[in-house]
């Protein structure tokens, strides 16, 4: 069967072969596989299934059929629909609830180098439009789980707010096709309502700014280490830090229902 390079995602080398995806194995791949197998065991939908390794040593995952935002801008209209935003919030809640019972392997290694401790969940950490799969009946799920790792619920949800509300840097949001900046407060609360978020919403902005700056630091570190997909860290990290500054400047009323 022929190999088809897949758009979207941040990891170099993913190809589709029939109904499977083949990707290079990374040092954290065994831990990610443990997460995906746990999700399968508890009946979680919205993530690929692990099928093993191919003859070239690449991981084999099931292919999530549907439409992805891909690499071209602006993004498709569905990305900024209320339906997609609500589905993302619901998906995130299911993921976090499903991974409360996850027990990592003793030799677990995570891309971001975070240490597991009781009380955390597993966050996707890159559940953004470029990793989403959309179908006529709604969000099918997310691919590219390399960045999955230990997380508080707020840290993972904050990144989804950055990329889906969106609360990312205004210039970047405009390039993706978003223009309804006056509607972002309503959209934020739609995401949080769909998740069933019960935390202090007036403090959620602090989680968003911290998440953006943390992500920028991780991108810089991975680029310095020569990790594939992070060879040009400058624009990504700069946009994240700019987003943090812009979110900090939002009025207090933005975070109130």
Image (spheres, grey):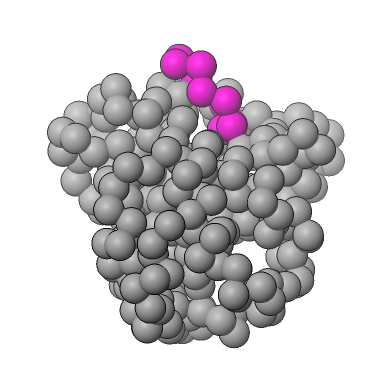
161 or 62: nearer the viewer:
161
| Residue 132: percent from left, percent from top | 64, 48
Relative height, residue 132 to residue 12 (above, below): above
173 or 145, nearer to the observer: 173
User: As rendered, which of 213 and 195 lies closer to the eye?
Assistant: 195
| Residue at 38% from the left image edge and 43% from the top image edge | 197
| Residue 210 as seen in the image, left or right of residue 92 | left
Task: Indicate the position of residue 87 as horizontal and vertical percent values.
Answer: 60, 41
Quarter holding residue 95 = top left
Residue at position x 78%, y 60% from top?
76
Residue 223: % across, % down: 40, 72
Name the quadrant of the N terminus: top right
Q: Main secondary structure of the magenta part?
A: loop
Quarter the C terminus occupies: bottom left
Q: Is residue 228 above or below residue 21?
A: below
Range drawn in magenta: 40-49
Q: Residue at x 46, y 40 (%)?
A: 195
């Amino acid at each position: 069967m022929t190999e088809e390079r897949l758009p979207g995602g941040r990891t170099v080398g993913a190809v589709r072969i029939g109904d499977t995806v083949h990707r290079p194995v990374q040092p954290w791949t065994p831990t990610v596989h443990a997460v995906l197998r746990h999700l399968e065991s508890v009946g979680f939908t919205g993530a690929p299934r692990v099928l093993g390794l191919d003859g070239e040593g690449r991981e084999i995952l099931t292919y999530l059929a549907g439409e992805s935002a891909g690499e071209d801008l602006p993004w498709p209209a569905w990305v900024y629909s209320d339906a997609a935003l609500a589905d993302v919030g619901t998906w995130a809640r299911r993921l976090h609830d499903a991974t409360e019972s996850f027990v990592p392997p003793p030799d677990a290694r995570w891309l971001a180098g975070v240490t597991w401790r009781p009380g955390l969940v597993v966050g996707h950490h890159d559940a953004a439009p470029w990793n989403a799969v959309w179908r006529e009946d709604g969000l099918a799920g997310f691919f590219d789980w390399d960045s999955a790792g230990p997380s508080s619920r707020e840290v993972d949800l904050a990144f989804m707010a950055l990329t889906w509300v969106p609360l990312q840097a205004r210039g970047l949001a405009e390039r993706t096709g978003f223009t309804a900046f006056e509607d972002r407060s309503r959209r934020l609360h739609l995401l949080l309502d769909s998740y069933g978020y019960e935390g202090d919403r007036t403090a959620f902005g602090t989680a968003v700014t911290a998440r953006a700056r943390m992500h920028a630091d991780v991108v810089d570190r991975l680029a310095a280490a020569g990790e594939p997909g992070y060879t040009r860290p400058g624009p990504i990290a700069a946009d994240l830090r700019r987003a943090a500054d812009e979110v900090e400047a939002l009025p207090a009323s933005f975070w109130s229902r």
